[in-house]
Image: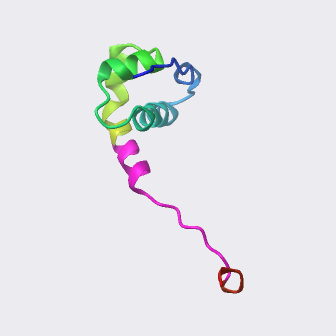
């Protein structure tokens, strides 16, 4: 697996942004990613990860299972 250091986490201004950042990293790394993968990818400490990991997991699952459907007017759909 090729791990890149995405430097978005230090720029997060609040907890919601941190949760979203870690959740997106979970989605990017895919199923089976480890704590070490997340720490290496984001460049964060174990305590920083521990503070948001449960909410980030829920965010990643919800973002992966929610589908946005495009709406097209009936005249254009046919």
State which quarter of the image contains the C terminus: bottom right
Q: Which residue appears at 47% of the width and 36% of the height? A: 24
The residue sitting at the right extreme is 76
Was residue 23 drawn as part of the magenta stretch in this picture? no
- Rendering coords of residue 1 (x, y %): 39, 23
- Rendering coords of residue 34 (x, y %): 29, 25
Q: Which residue appears at 46% of the width and 14% of the height? A: 43
Q: Give the camera-side residue of 45 and 77.
A: 77
Which image quadrant is residue 27 in? top left
* 26 vs 78: above or below: above
* 2 vs 30: above or below: above
Was residue 71 drawn as part of the magenta stretch in this picture? yes
Q: Is residue 14 left or right of residue 34?
A: right
Question: Which contiguous range is marked in magenta?
Answer: 58-73
Which image quadrant is residue 3 in? top left
- Rendering coords of residue 41 (x, y %): 45, 20
For the image, the number of numbered tags is 0
Q: How is the image coloured?
A: rainbow
Q: Give the camera-side residue of 54 and 26.
A: 26
Which image quadrant is residue 2 in? top left
Q: Which residue appears at 45% of the width and 35% of the height? A: 28
């Amino acid at each position: 697996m090729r791990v890149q250091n995405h430097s978005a986490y230090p720029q997060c201004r609040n907890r919601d942004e941190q949760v979203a950042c870690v959740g997106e990293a979970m989605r990017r790394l895919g199923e089976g990613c480890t704590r070490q993968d997340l720490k290496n990818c984001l460049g964060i400490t174990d305590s920083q990860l521990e503070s948001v990991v449960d909410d980030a997991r829920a965010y990643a699952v919800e973002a992966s299972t929610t589908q946005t459907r495009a709406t097209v007017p009936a005249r254009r759909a046919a």
